[in-house]
Image (spheres, helix red, strand yellow):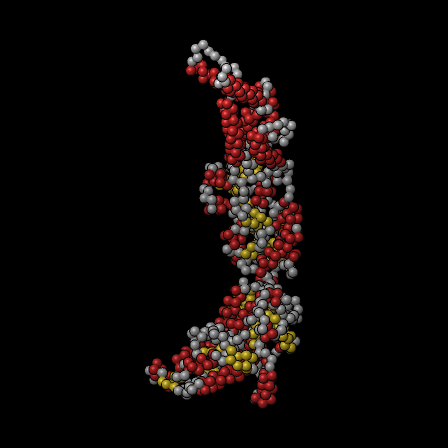
Amino acid sequence: METDVVAIIGPQTSIMAHVLSHLANELTVPMLSFTALDPTLSPLQFPFFVQTAPSDLFLMRAIAEMITYYGWSDVVALYNDDDNSRNGVTALGDELEERRCKISYKAVLPLDVVITSPVEIIEELIKIRGMESRVIVVNTFPNTGKMIFKEAERLGMMEKGYVWIATTWLSSVLDSNLPLDTKLVNGVLTLRLHTPDSRKKRDFAARWKNKLSNNKTIGLNVYGLYAYDTVWIIARAVKTLLEAGGNLSFSNDAKLGSLKDEALNLSALSRFDQGSQLLDYIVHTKMSGLTGPVQFHPDRSMLQPSYDIINLVDDRVHQIGYWSNYSGLSIVPPESFYSKPPNRSSSNQHLNSVTWPGGTSVTPRGWIFRNNGRRLRIGVPDRASFKDFVSRVNGSSNKVQGYCIDVFEAAVKLLSYPVPHEFIFFGDGLTNPNYNELVNKVTTGVDFDAVVGDIAIVTKRTKIVDFTQPYIESGLVVVAPVTRLNENPWAFLRPFTLPMWAVTASFFVIVGAAIWILEHRINDEFRGPPRRQIITILWFTFSTMFFSHRETTVSTLGRMVLLIWLFVVLIITSSYTASLTSILTVQQLNSPIKGVDTLISSTGRIGFQVGSFAENYMTDELNIASSRLVPLASPEEYANALQNGTVAAIVDERPYIDLFLSDYCKFAIRGQEFTRCGWGFAFPRDSPLAVDMSTAILGLSETGELQKIHDRWLSKSNCSSPHGSQSGDSEQLNVHSFWGMFLVVGIACLVALFIHFFKIIRDFCKDTPEVVVEEAIPSPKSSRLTKLQTFLAFVDEKEEETKRRLKRKRNNDHSMNANSIISRTASRRPI
């Protein structure tokens, strides 16, 4: 670089690229590399560094999509401790995380150039062999890579069950015809930068084989094609610069000029004056090269990066498909998709069949059990009570039975692979063990590989282990002593409260009185002796309940009141019937404890099951004093404590309580479940077996097998009318629910009565009684009394009689008027 240069091709490694890019920035000399593909070589930090081949970011994206395609979730990364390998693995981790996968272990090896012994490689491979993940990504260089596969073969890691994915270094070794024992890489997947087939590419390959290669045994790999295109990129850019009238000039750099005494002689380096202009022509290159269309995106990434996916089988290179950043995985060349809209849906991703290590064509599941597949140690609680869930078989040390065990074994049978396991008891069997301690045993990986049993899925536990899908619903409930309410001859009165009964009866009387007033003067049914009239009133009001009115004419106002009352009665009777049916059908229970709220506000003592999380929940979440809590160990202790008043109620999980209530009928659940959770099986964090077991549990639920297991162990009852399903007293119907309808009936009665009395007063004012009672010396008091008596007699009088009298009076008035007219006419005639 002490000579005047306008561009630099290289370096080959990312380590040197990071160093020299700073110098290229200072001298404004474009630096182009087709092998230093570190994803962290950003154009923002190194504006004069240009990658003329796709960045390894796309290589890692392709590998991540392959891992997702085959359904794996954990991988092991094996790489050299250099910038390119390390940063590539970091990019792989980011891509996997976006797809909800991860790198479970990073095996770091020394630099490729310093490895002289396989000792470090063997140590890392032995560690990997003892891990769960069997998907291994090798991102290294040829020297290290060949040593890795040689030692992996010796350690038995190239057998069935393993997945090996090598980055582009392996395809370069194969294409270059470099020495490689292909038996060591049988079943391995590798990738190669994809270059479309073209006549230009075929012609160049023929020239390379016949003339250009100094050694006929050296093959042409894909990076040779990118090297050729890189030279043409610079040549075209320089030509464009010169054709645009530019010249090539250099000047001294002030910063480097001050370093004259340095051993590197940096002061001799010159700054390229047209470097920025030449860089602009380079990144705007648009040509057709040996590698296909050559063009850069604004972020300096190559146009349409893509890879061939290769499977090495019996000394042969078998291409199983392609990956493109545009279309994803496919079995046809990616350039056939560029003219179509992108479709990255999972149903559109395809690869051909693969021969995996060990010669199998069945896709490996990608993991095994820890410590190279030994039997799983399953921890189970050695319970002292509620043994229907988990219990020993006749005192055996490792034989277990119970509802939880049957669910686990049924789920294991649905897996596509065997799960060798043994059960190990936790606890002494005299008292229930502490379940938090049991779950903690899984996190160490020393005591248990999993925990099976009645393990509640609570927040504290989910932070340290992974649970399967819940196989039974659970939640804390309150149990208390109860008495039966519907064993009472007066139970039919319970649907209504006392005020509701009183108001309903009052309105029967009110409506009856209103009907009598409206009909008394016009309807013979409402006249006669008082006893007969009372019976008629009751008949009309009560008959609305049965829709059976007699053939009786009722006035318009009376009909309006009756219709409104009928509507109200219909609603009331339907509500009464529904409530009474509920009371007589469902066992109604009474207890001072209505639920968790009344339990908290009371001062009574509360029982809980030994070892349950209910104790911590009540003290931490409900702020119940620990002095109020009483530990109980068995259903018998539950019953005794509730019966003798030692505790006012018991708080425990729903499955235990359901089993308890199947034998003890004098108690019931009060209120609703105040926590929502379930029971599951606990596995170490990120265990793939937890995911597969969850899928199996869902399968059991869908086929009905889960319910059958439940019925076999838990669906039993010694009570004729089990109380466990009752949550509290039924709600009585009160007057507040119907006051609006009663108001409508009252208003209708008042309006009808107002109209009725208005008509009566109007007719009374027009009427002159035929019989006038005269007193010798009338007084004002007797006059008012006489008028009142006359008005009441008028009201009580049948309307037809009043109409006849008014008609007779009008006729008399007309006769008198005619006689008066005749008399006046006769008196005016002359005699």
Q: How far across and how far down the image is residue 684, in percent? A: 54, 58
Q: Nearer the viewer, residue 513 or 142?
A: 513
Q: How far across and how far down the image is residue 456, in percent? A: 55, 50
Q: Nearer the viewer, residue 225 or 531?
A: 531
Q: How far across and how far down the image is residue 822, in percent? A: 52, 19
In the depicted structure, whether residue 352 falls above or below residue 476: below
Q: Which residue reaches farthest front?
A: 831
User: Residue at coordinates 63% horizontally, 30% vertically from top-left?
Assistant: 546
- Count the marks: 0
Q: Which residue reaches farthest top?
A: 776
Q: Which residue reaches farthest bottom?
A: 211
User: Residue at coordinates 57% horizontally, 73% vertically from top-left?
Assistant: 338
User: Residue at coordinates 58% horizontally, 90% vertically from top-left?
Assistant: 211
In the depicted structure, whether residue 798 falls above or below residue 476: above
Q: Quadrant of residue 62?
A: bottom right
Q: Nearer the viewer, residue 152 or 653?
A: 653
